[in-house]
Amino acid sequence: METEQLGRERCEAIFGEVADCARTCGIRDIEAIIAGGEHALTRFANNTIHQNVAERTVHLSVRPVIDGRTARASTNRLDSAGIREVVEAAIAITRLTEPDSELLPLTQPMPSREAKRFHKATAQANPDERAAAVAEAIAAVEDKGQTAAGIYSTGHSLFALLNSRGVSAWHAETTARFSITAMAADSSGWAKASSNYHGELNPLELAICAARKAEQSQEPRAIPPGRYTVVLEPAAVLDLVGQMFGDFSATAIRDGRSFLNDRVGKKIFGDNITIHDDFLDPLQSGPSFDGEGVPRRRLTLVDRGVVRDIAYCRQAAASAGAEPTGHGFPVPNEMGEAPANIVMEGGSSSVDEMIRSIGRGILVTRLWYIREVDPYEKIFTGMTRDGTFLIESGEVTGGVRNFRFNQSLIELLSNVEMISPAFRASGEESMDMVVPAIKVRHFNFTEVTRF
């Protein structure tokens, strides 16, 4: 079934069949999640487009509630027989499941504000359109004697949650991503951007940026590891700071697996650090409701360095005597909840101004292979890549060999000296956040990597 047919009315019709099947089996309380999408990707390497793929997915997940028990069953068949089989399977699995004393009834309908993030032109973008943009980007890199590789993807997705208590939440959105790596003999540069509307992407500009980074970082020098003043571009900020937001979770705090245990309400970052979870931010993506059908609320996670709000799913909220915040995952799950729309408040400094303010330091394009070393102090290790530069006397003077770092996020966000305006940034994975570039003192590089 084509996902473009899965509008609100079709989702409600599917749920009608789910509810009818459940009633036939003597079950009154049932929930359905319908999700799917159509995504196409143009991949290029060695200055040549070598792959164009497209996929269409759709699935139905059904969850009954029976005498304090619940479980899920899923299918990608949305015909009547497929719907009947998945409902019967979900009921059978649920009846074999142990009761959960904390299980709540299904979500009741609640008013929410819709986030409109669907652009028909992006949903209809075709291979020729992507190929033309990729060819222009490749030409810009090739003109510098470099080799280009990357992807350009476009697509649309839907997510609907309906239940027998009257919840009927539905969201559709489009997404486009362009990523490019420019490779020279001994250096590389990288750029990536995403948007709900592909017309906001500029592949040529991104290619020129990546090629410039590769050109400027040729013949990289090896300089000693140590603590440096660094400028982290937005992708690097996302890559590293983005690692901590799963801890802003009431369930994680209750389970003792969050670095915020005993720190909520306390000042642990600098005065210039304020971070929100805001699904209505125009640079953000995603639905206005969570995996339980609860409307998302705007949270102030950090207010001028002080940890303020945390996310609550329904079960965690009931246990704590709080209100759910609309950040829960589909039930049943072990993780509970997490912020989904990170927006770090920006400042007024440009990256160029940050560079000019540094006597000797490092400019970092992005990070990768990031792993946690100390969960409570939030210390991470990882490496720089695709554009690491030496700053001397307020100027970028050339490329340097990549570093491995060992860095506490608490220390990092206590040592921020300058902040740029915030941008929608894309990192190594598909995760996007709205974050600025930052200038940070005493960033800890522990060794020079081999490449």
Image (cartoon, rainbow, N blue to C red):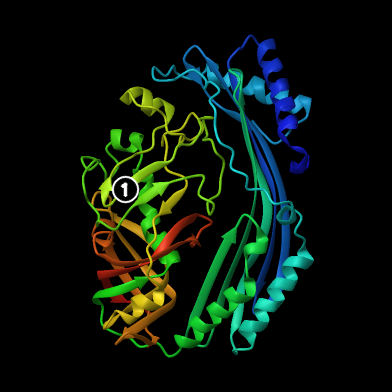
Q: Quadrant of residue 222?
A: bottom left
Q: Is residue 99 left or right of residue 1?
A: left
Tally of numbered tags = 1
* Image position, residue 312 (x, y; %): 39, 33
Q: Is residue 125 above or below residue 291?
A: below
In the visual, does 48 lie left or right of 161? right
Quadrant holding the C terminus:
bottom left
Q: Which residue is mark 1?
A: 302
161 versus 369 height, above or below = above
Please tell me how crowded label 1 is: few (under 14), some (14-19), or many (20+) other residues with Cα within 10 Å.
many
- Percent across and percent down for residue 208 are 58, 80
Quadrant in the rendering for residue 20: top right
Residue type, numbered disc 1? Val
- Which residue is farthest front? 348
* Residue 428 image point, x, y percent: 49, 62
Task: Look at the picture and state if 4 lies above or below 72.
Answer: below
Taking the image as shown, residue 294 lies to the left or right of residue 257, namely: right
Residue 96 at x, y percent in the picture: 52, 18
Quadrant the N terminus occupies: top right
Name the residue rendered at 67%, 63% in the picture.
Answer: 199
Depth check: 46 or 268 in front? 268
Is 113 or 334 nearer to us in this picture? 113
Taking the view exactly as shown, the residue that stands out farthest to the top is 26
Which residue is depicted at the point 31% across and 25% down? 320
Q: Residue at x 69, y 78 (%)?
A: 136
**Residue drawn at (53%, 35%), measured in percent from left and top?**
289
Viewed as shown, does residue 447 lie left or right of 151?
Answer: left
Residue 75, compared with residue 281, is above or below; it is above
